[in-house]
Amino acid sequence: MTEPRIAPLTDPSPEVAEILGMAGPPDRPPLNIFTTLANHPRLLKRFNVLGGLFLGRVALAGFYGMVSCVLNAARVQRESGTPGWPSG
């Protein structure tokens, strides 16, 4: 598959651009996951709220939070059949 199933938004409205501006460092463009979610602004807002809960209010220490992110990313890559990952 060479084309994404849902293409990232390339020309956001001013409201969506403001939300995307909060999705990462100000000196870098937003990640594709955010620009793809920007196709549905309501979903993008809710996703940012969920991310904020994990980053700000969950009682995981920084190390354990990072470990859980890495393990989840590995699981997703393995389940999606990415070459180089053992199928499980």
Image: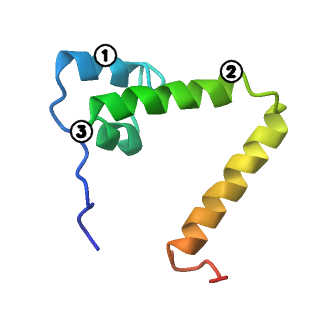
The quarter of the image holding the N terminus is bottom left
Where 33 falls versus 11 (above or below)? below
Q: Identify the residue at horizontal 80%, vertical 32% (top origin).
A: 62
Q: Identify the residue at horizontal 18%, vertical 37% (top origin).
A: 10
Few, some or many residues within 10 Å of mark 1 (<14, 14–19, 20+): few
The quarter of the image holding the C terminus is bottom right
Q: Residue furthest bottom?
A: 87
Q: Are marks 3 and 2 in contact (CB under 8 Å)?
A: no
Front position among marks 3 and 1? 3
Few, some or many residues within 10 Å of mark 3 (<14, 14–19, 20+): some
Residue type indicated by callout 1: Glu
User: Where on the picture, by quarter, is residue 58?
Assistant: top right
Q: Identify the residue at horizontal 57%, vertical 63% (top origin).
A: 76
Picture coordinates of residue 66, whole percent (x, y): 74, 42
Residue type indicated by callout 3: Asn
Picture coordinates of residue 52, whole percent (x, y): 58, 24
- Residue that numbered label 2 is attached to: 56
Query: Of label 2 and label 1, which has the lower sequence position?
Result: 1
**Element type at mark 3:** loop
User: Where on the picture, by quarter, is residue 87?
Assistant: bottom right
User: How many tags in the picture?
Assistant: 3
- Residue that numbered label 1 is attached to: 18
**Element type at mark 1:** helix
Specify whether residue 65 is in view.
yes
Q: Return the residue nearer the eye: 27 or 47.
A: 47
CA–CA distance between discs 3 and 2? 26 Å
Number of the label disc, if any, that sits on residue 30: none
- Residue that numbered label 3 is attached to: 39
Q: Return the residue nearer the eye: 40 or 3.
A: 40
